[in-house]
Amino acid sequence: MGCKNVLESVYKIDKNISFFYASSSEIYGKIKGEISLNSKKYPVNPYGISKLKGLNITKLYREKYKLKASSAIIFNTESTLRDKSFLIPKICIAAINAHKYNLKTAFGNLDIKREWNWCDDQCELLIKFLKKKPQDFIISNGKCLSAKQMLKFAFDYFNLDYKMYIFKDKQFLRPVDIKIKTSKYKESLIKNKITKKNFTYGKKIINLMIKNYLKPNLK
């Protein structure tokens, strides 16, 4: 309703106002193969359902009412500002705690594979896309890595074996967990004649976050 209310306000006040909606790869749910804009959408959680509704409402106002309304289907975003309860920050903190205090950390399903994106890269692309014709587009990097691989990067930072410092806890398992989620990210770039050569991903993301968390007086 929030998305619809803002779009309705734009329609009534000034149709020249540009509107951007941040959707999510969670709108696809369980799907085999690489995800494209035209892939079938079967969200399996309330978050995905809400993001799909927002995407469809934005598209409706763009096509029916000719608003300058765009939606980005964004894959996993990582940043030093992200809450530490999310998986990648949690992995980095687990490695730091193992190094400093010899502590073990509980995790859920570590067999998942995702395209972990650096926020700066996604914002750079977002700005480029918003200069184009209003549309739906995918923002990701195409670098699909497992949670276990990201764990290895984090614990390798301290020359530790992650298997010695983690354990599985059922409380962190989700009823429905999508194993692999990867995108046809180049599809939207090529269509809009947008190029980006270098992405920050994998080990680089882990190292940037750990270095940030190790800064003095950082809570």
Image (spheres, rainbow, N blue to C red):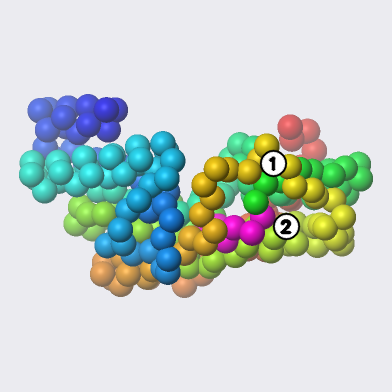
Q: Which mark is residue 151?
A: 2
Is residue 120 visible to the viewer in this orientation of the structure? no
Which residue carries the number 1 mark? 170
Q: Nearer the viewer, residue 173 or 62?
A: 173
* Location of residue 191 with respect to 118 vertically, above or below: below
Task: Tell me which amino acid carries mark 2.
Answer: Leu
* Location of residue 111 with respect to 93 vertically, above or below: below
Tell me which corner region of the image, top left, top right, bottom left or bottom right, holds residue 61.
Answer: top left
Q: Is residue 2 left or right of residue 201?
A: left
Residue 38, given in percent of the width and then of the height, sits at: 27, 62
- Magenta span: 110-117
Q: Using a 10 Å C-alpha cutoff, classify the residue at mark 1 as few (fewer than 14 neighbours), some (14 to 19) or many (20 or more).
A: few
Q: Secondary structure at mark 1?
A: helix
Earlier in the chain: of badge 1 and badge 2, it is 2
Tell me which corner region of the image, top left, top right, bottom left or bottom right, holds residue 163.
Answer: bottom right
For the C terminus, the quadrant is: top right
* Location of residue 165 with respect to 145 vertically, above or below: above
Give the mark toward the camera: 1 or 2. 1
